[in-house]
Image: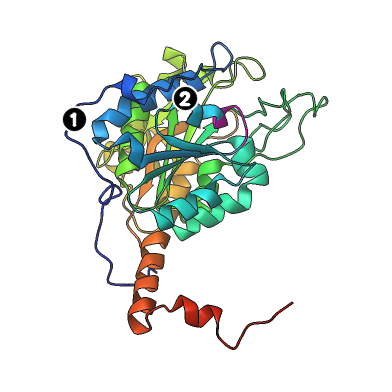
Amino acid sequence: MSIDLGLPDLGGLAEVPTTDEPQKAKDYKSDQEVRWCPGCGDYIVLNTMQSFLPTLGLKPENIVFVSGIGCSSRFPYYMDTYGMHSIHGRAPAIATGLATSRPDLSVWVITGDGDALSIGGNHLIHALRRNVNFKILLFNNRIYGLTKGQYSPTSEEGKRTKSTPMGSLDHPFNPLSLALGAEASFVARALDSDKKGLTEVLTAAAQHRGSAFVEIYQNCPIFNDGAFDVLKDKDEAARRIIPLRPGEPITFGPESEYGVVRSGFAGLETAKVFEIGLDNVVVHDSTVADPAYAFALSRIGGQDLEHTPTGIFRQVARTTYDDAARAQVAQASEAKPADLQALLRGNDTWTV
């Protein structure tokens, strides 16, 4: 339940200054040489971001990218905006300070599966539960790439790597389930190779007021090449990928012959449409207030990517942490105007 603080219903970009000057992708390309391995999925995400940002009509000086540590965390260097390459796992904490103190900024966090879900796990879940008004892009390649190929929190069970030569014993995180468990107000998934789908998700995330969490399946050609090939092969993709379209029955397959139906107490599963009837196929609604529906969607499929929903899982409105913090400060200042000198020279001071 959200606390009603009498705050205005603002869009995600409502306070960020805009410009009428036409922009192009090149306006967001920095003068830095892009240094990722040939074939890395990060190139596609970077290109998509640089192509998509001009459509928002924002001023580049009011956009900031904050990253942690990892291959993806080089991202801020390649954007001609403000940015910060911070420390391992702490990007959400730094971005929280920015979003709270500077409502005129569009704040983006760039992170990887290791950076966000291992050392940065606590920062991630608390940012999401607080609903801070920034966007988190998690580049998930299911491996530690920067440190040369150790298994990560999203590597599948049995994964053989330099740090698990006999196969990983860990059960991996499902990033979307984790975000939904923290009651993130916006949760989505996209593929690095699907520029159209990724652009649609990024646009919705940018316009959302609150924490927007986007998982991007991204290929690492050196240490985990082909991890998502089954979702990129034309024939396999049609059978495995479940596109989530607002207000439409959730169907998939070459002839839309499969659908998502209710199962058990609160679950969802896939079935053949001709066996269960189109009327029994779930109609997608990302605005359902109860996160249980989106959580059930995130549980469809598994480590083998047999079925993989993509698109927006959840998109709901609730009070953001930064709006609430600013309202609280204004309320306190109105009740008792701040007197810095009185605070510094008051009785509760000590000389050491």
- What residue do we see at 28% from left, 67% from top? 7
Observer-nearest residue: 118 or 28? 28
Observer-nearest residue: 140 or 157? 140
Q: How many marks?
A: 2
Residue 277 numbered tag: none
Q: Quadrant of the N terminus?
A: bottom left
For the question of whether residue 244 can be seen, the reply is no
Q: Look at the magenta stretch and give its main secondary structure.
A: loop
Residue 61 position within the rendered picture, expressed as x and y whole percent measured from the top left: 35, 38
Residue 191 position within the rendered picture, expressed as x and y whole percent measured from the top left: 45, 26
Taking the view exactly as shown, the residue that stands out farthest to the bottom is 347
Residue indicated by mark 1 = 21
The answer to whether residue 347 is left or right of residue 108 is right
Residue 331 position within the rendered picture, expressed as x and y whole percent measured from the top left: 35, 77
Residue 210 position within the rendered picture, expressed as x and y whole percent measured from the top left: 38, 53
Whether label 1 touches label 2, CB < 8 Å:
no
Along the polypeptide, which appears first: circle 1 or circle 2?
A: 1
The verdict on residue 143 being magenta is no
Observer-nearest residue: 32 or 192? 32
Name the kind of residue labelled 1 in the image: Glu
SS for tag 1? loop
| 100, above or below 115, in the image | below
Residue 78 numbered tag: 2
Q: Which residues are magenta?
A: 69-73
SS for tag 2? helix
| 221, above or below 333, in the image | above
For the question of whether residue 188 can be seen, the reply is yes
